[in-house]
Structures are given as structure tokens and as C-alpha cells.
Image (tube, grey):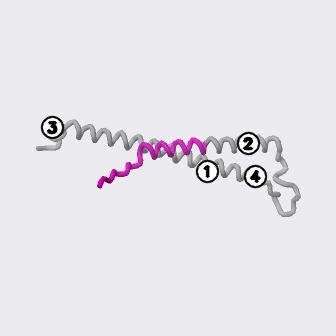
Amino acid sequence: MNKFTKLITEGADKTLQRRAEAVSTAAEIAQQNLVNKLKLEKSNLKLKITNLTDLAPDSKDSLRPCDANWNPNTWVTDLQRAKQDLYNVTIQLEIAQKTYDEFFKEEAEMVTD
């Protein structure tokens, strides 16, 4: 029997299994992409906050913190926004990771004695 004949004659369960595996793989990759995107966004926001809170003088000879164009109002606004964004992304990442774990981690096999 050739492959084409086998595909035509095999049971619906095998066909359904192949389709389910393909759909599951696509969904898992999409969910993992979301998790990775949020991890990168979180990392970038942490770096932004680190840069915003680096108020050291530009040189050892300078007594002025930051650069000459530093604006306290802009700094406060930018820092607040970055911290809020980090908070939101952290929650989104937690939800995305829990969703991944819920739907795509292998379930432990039940052990019966």
C-alpha cells in the first residue's frame, strides 16, 4: 500500500491527531513569541530606568550632575512613565507565562498503584 492510499484509508483519529499536533505547535510558538517579546520589552525598560537614574557628573572635573540640558520635569515624567510601563509589562509577562504553562507544558502522567 502506498502512502496516498494509507492517508485515504487511515482512521479519522490519526488524521485528527496530525491536525491537532500542527495547530498545537503553531499556537505554542505564537505564545512563546509573546513571552519572549515581553521579556525583551521588560529588559529594555530596566535598562531605560538604569539610564534615567544615572545622574553622575559627565566628567571627574564637573560638579554638575547629568548633562547641561537636564530638565527635572522631563526626568520625573520619563522616569514615572518607564516605571509604569515596567510594572505593566511585568504583569503582562506573568500572565503570558502562566498561559504558556497552562496550555503547553506537558501534563505529568498520573501514577496509579
Q: What residue is disc 2 on?
A: 80
Q: Find the distance from the CA under tag 1 to the CA under tag 3.
A: 52 Å
Whichever of labels 4 and 1 marks the residue nearer the N terminus, that label is 1
4 or 3: tag closer to the N-terminus: 3
Q: Is residue 6 above or below residue 68?
A: above
Discs 1, 3 touching: Cβ within 8 Å:
no
Kind of residue sitting beneath label 1: Ser
Q: Position of residue 101 (x, y in %)?
A: 45, 46
Q: Which residue is mark 3?
A: 9
Q: Find out whether the residues at labels 4 and 3 contact each other: C-beta distance under 8 Å.
A: no
Q: Position of residue 29 (x, y in %)?
A: 43, 44
Distance, label 2 to label 1, CA atoms, is 17 Å
Three-letter code for the amino acid on which mark 4 is drawn: Thr
Tag 1 secondary structure = helix
Quadrant position of residue 88:
top right
- For this rendering, which residue is in front, 52 or 111? 111
Is residue 103 located in the magenta-colored stretch of the structure?
yes
Q: Residue at x 14, y 39 (%)?
A: 5
The residue depicted at 28 percent of the width and 41 percent of the height is 18
Badge 2: how crowded within 10 Å, few (<14), some, or many (20+)? Answer: few
